[in-house]
Image (cartoon, rainbow, N blue to C red):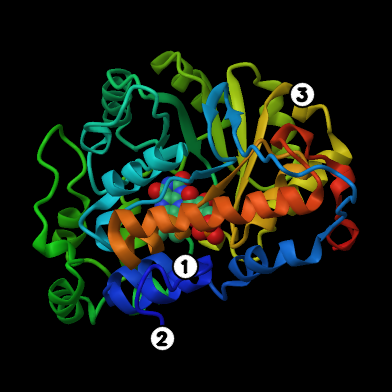
Amino acid sequence: PLATLDECLNLDDIEALATRKINRKAWGYYYSAGDDLISKTLNNTVYSKILMRPRIFVDCTRCDTSTTILGQKVNVPFFVSPAAMARLGNPAGERGIAQACETYGALQIISNNASQTPEQILEGCGPDQVFGWQLYVQNERAKSEEMIRRIHALPNIKFIVLTLDAPVPGKREHDERSKNVAANLGARSSIQSGSASTTTPAPTTGAPLRLEEQVEASGNLDGGVGKALFAGTAPDLTWRTTLPWLRKQTDLPIVLKGLQTHEDAYMASLHAPQVKGIILSNHGGRAMDTAPPSIHTLLEIRKYCPEVFSRLEVFVDGGIRRGTDVVKALCLGAKGVGLGRAPLFGLGAGGVEGVERTLEILKGEVETAMRLLGVEKVSELGQQHVNARAVERD
Ligand code: FNR
């Protein structure tokens, strides 16, 4: 088995290494998805059905992976999607992911349920590093309003992502099953890899989110970590009420996450320019099982309401394993591509260096794919570079 980050040549290797290093509870929470993992499996396989159309006689001496996301300059066209509880896998936590993102000029979206406070995650980062912050609207709206006020004090955070695909968590059985073994394996793993949450001091500044304690103290892991984290999340969001409320709280650009149909993408586009972007996502298969992979939704939008692309920026996430996956999504109109589990597994495999290795591998693969396609810049990627007919037929 792989023992070092250098031996890891692709993202599956990193996941395999992390799986050996992190404790059972962390693995159960990260790996899990809804019901039978059908959406998760589709996410991981759908890109293999899209074929590349490489051109010859194109000078590919140079290759530039930089682009912009919501007007922010980034060095790579992939970003870190919001994911809760990074400290479950390694004490470096979300701050560790931020350090790796700084090295690679990658954008990171901080989860509402991060295991460190936004202030801690941003501590020491340079003025050019860019972030988004993801919101789960709380039943007690005042709590969300207070968080948004704190976000406004952090100039590196450029936009707010409102997640909408998980008004309730999906039924995640790997997560539920891992609850009993958590305590034992947590202790063992903290010695082996320094990764048990119980050994690390919890965030101390600002109010939120001593989530690990919250989760542990609730003593109610019957639904797994996921269910415990969702306690307090509002299930009553609507087009009519929630966007006006959020607009009142913030002038930051708003991005809606978790759209799974062209109808909702079109609805969102009617709210442009208040809504500046949408992330097509099925939450890594963790919410509604058998919901479509985001690339299906992207193709639907191309077919039924292509004007959406000119009204706002469209992003996708879910199942990104390879640089070719990233490039295919960009060819079909995505402005950027999100990574959920990959940075968490990178962190679990080797802390900050593990995330750096993850980003390094993916960046290298994106460059190779662009060069082999005959493309020098991200903006040159287009529909002419792929054949997506097999997915369009699905
Ligand atoms: C997530 N995701 C997520 N999304 C969100 O909006 N807020 C959150 O707090 C979380 N938390 C979270 C935890 C874990 C462990 C995972 C795996 C995922 C969903 C995430 O942003 C993203 O949509 C998917 O993970 C993308 O799929 P891949 O890249 O994991 O296949």
Does dot 3 land on a helix, a strand or a loop?
Answer: helix
Task: Kindly identify which numbered label has been placed on residue 335.
Answer: none
Left or right relative to 113: residue 218: left
Within 8 Å of ligand 1, the CB of disc 1? no
Asked which quadrant contains residue 149, the reply is: top left
* Circles 1 and 3 in contact, beta carbons < 8 Å: no
Q: Nearer the viewer, residue 306 or 19?
A: 19
**Label 3 is placed on what type of residue?**
Ser
Residue that numbered label 3 is attached to: 310
- CA neighbours of label 3 inside 10 A, class few (<14), some (14 to 19), many (20+): few
Residue 235 in percent (x, y) is at 45, 44
Residue 168 in view of the camera: no
Residue 250 higher or lower than 365, as above or below: above
Left or right relative to 236: residue 118: left
* CA distance for labels 1 and 3: 36 Å
* Circles 1 and 2 in contact, beta carbons < 8 Å: no
* CA distance for labels 2 and 3: 47 Å
Asked which quadrant contains residue 293, the reply is: bottom right
Residue 59 in percent (x, y) is at 81, 42
- CA neighbours of label 1 inside 10 A, class few (<14), some (14 to 19), many (20+): many
**Label 2 is placed on what type of residue?**
Pro
Which residue is pictured at 48% across the width and 53% down the height? 360
Residue that numbered label 2 is attached to: 1
